Image (spheres, grey):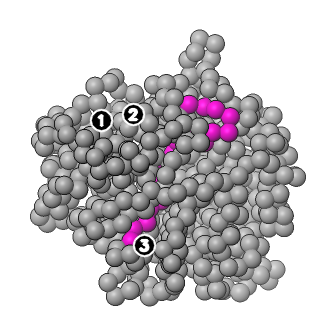
Amino acid sequence: MKKKIQPFLYLSITVSLFTAFFAPTVNAQSFFKNHPQINPFQYEIVKEKTFQKAAVTSAHPLASMIGVAILQEGGNAFDAAIATQFTLAVVFPGAGNIGGGGFMLARKNNGELMGIDYREAAPKKASKDMYLDAQGNAINAMSKEGASASGIPGSVAGMISTHAYAKLPLEKLIEPAIELAKYGFVISEREAKGLNSEKANFLRNSSAPSAFTSRTWKSGDTLFQPDLAATLLRIQEKGLAGFYEGPTAEMIVKEMNYSGGFISLEDLKNYRPKFRKPIEFEYKNHHVISFSPPSSGGIIIAQMLKMIAPFEVEKMGLNTEASVSLMVEAQRRAYADRAEHMGDPDYYKVPTQTLISDAYVKDRMKDYQPGVVGSSKITQAGIPHESEQTTHFSVIDAEGNMVAITTTLNDTYGNKTIVAGAGFLLNNEMDDFSVKAGVPNMYGAIGGEANSIQPGKRMLSSMTPTLVTLNNKPYISIGTPGGTTIPNQVFEGLVNIIDFKMSIKEAIDAPRFHHQWIPDVLALESDFPQDVADALTKKGYKVTKRGRFGRMDGIKYNADGSLSAAGDKRGDDSVAGY
Ligand code: DON
């Protein structure tokens, strides 16, 4: 069957952002002085490119280029990932972050795997019913906006733990982010629109105006973030204590006190990332590695890929009635398990090995009948939220070390609260907990005991940074934002590459679909083929069209040892390498 994919409209888009007239002197900047090829005031989005040795793909061209510059300075994939994460915190404030959390998945070239969970944790003052009113009803905004929505941020600690595997001094890896925050960079149209649309929310939730609210933005404007530069400098000088103690911690707690937040100085000081054993499984001769709880992503993609493995998906064709209904029935079953069985494994016994075992997965598909539409049999929980603002990036270095990181503030620009004086946004990750059994979160996902709130517990995530090896050699690093759509996107991306033999760029750009058990709705991207949408509706699926899901970034080895890197057509995502 012929692949139905959108033709590429471009390989690279030039962002016309040049404002040399306003560019500050760069003499004081050690990083940019040494890397004149990276110009924060004029840069290009590169959507797809093949490199001989190493590549980085992320949500922002500057972050990808800086990652590569660090590799060329002698850093490995871990160095590049740390520099990329800190850079994204400056150039992509809607999701790149130091006020949020994430998951770092890596495979070293010697085959060693590592998973660092730097997910936010519930503060000590948190409790199961903290977001319920006196009548026991969920108070909608409280887990979503303002200080009350924040979990204890994990990103800075996560990067410092990752640094154990890096080669260059941490100071060097933070330096580019400091310089971008201090001396500015030009913003894209997309960022200008994002900041403008949140201005009122930022002002309402934060105790003071910030760099983001200083004006109405347009493409090509320079964003200076002096408070953020000072915070990054404290981290550069003092490491963990530069964020989790001293002035930064005090500013966070002050912001908590301003709008009813729960995080204390003690919570911050006690925060630690956790090492997690990655999920591993086989799919059609490929070895897939992904993140374990408190992310649901690894278990879900293991279940779904195993559920469809007995079928000849490649013969059904990309985005056909047959392949979509098979994959949707797998999605329905895996997401039902997510709601019931998944949460922070340190607080709830998640039966991970059973859930991904061949016998269990086979049993789950026992009642699957090709051509018959399943039913989630439970009242619909509402239409999932459309935020696209988590971010994923992938790095592969010249030695074959692979890193996949997905990191987030949860919603776009998190809880819309900028820590006064510290210049960064906080997350609203507490909404990823099940605030009440059966009450949907902002992605329409429901949960129960497994994901109920407890002090110190980490909220269930869908983030799915994923690596694949082939014949025991590094092959793919991939991931995406998109809330509960994330595991489905990664599932579909892998099927596109493995079954439909698409290039990484084709696999990433192909139209996506999403079913999450509840609501019992099949959501299709707006460019999903209409004839197949009609056929699925006719068959009995409740089909809705949604704008777009996620911004997937990935890198894949080619047979000749070169690397193809791709950035999603859906964002400013951009690749770099050498
Ligand atoms: O961890 C999670 O599953 C969510 N907080 C991710 C949020 C997200 O992907 C938002 N962007 N689309």
Q: Which mark is residue 383?
A: 2
Residue in the picture at 36% in, 66% down? 287
Which region is colored magenta?
A: 452-469
Q: Is mark 3 within 8 Å of ligand 1?
A: no
Residue in the picture at 68% in, 39% down? 456
Identify whether 140 is placed above or below 269. above
- Residue 556: x and y in percent read 39, 74
Q: Which residue is mark 3?
A: 555
Give the quarter of the image for residue 371: top left
Q: Which mark is residue 521?
A: 1
- Label 1 crowd (10 A; few <14 / some 14-19 / many >=20): many
Give the quarter of the image for residue 184: bottom right
Identify whether 303 is placed above or below 42. above
**Amino acid tagged 3:** Ile
- Residue 430: x and y in percent read 61, 37
- Residue 462 located within the stretch drawn in magenta: yes
Give the structural element (helix, strand or loop) at label 3.
Answer: strand
**Amino acid tagged 2:** Ile
Counting residues from the start of the chain, the first of labels 1 and 3 encountered is: 1
Instruction: From the image, give the main secondary structure of the stretch colored magenta.
Output: loop
Do tag 2 and tag 1 residues touch (Cβ < 8 Å)? Answer: yes
Q: Which mark is residue 549?
A: none
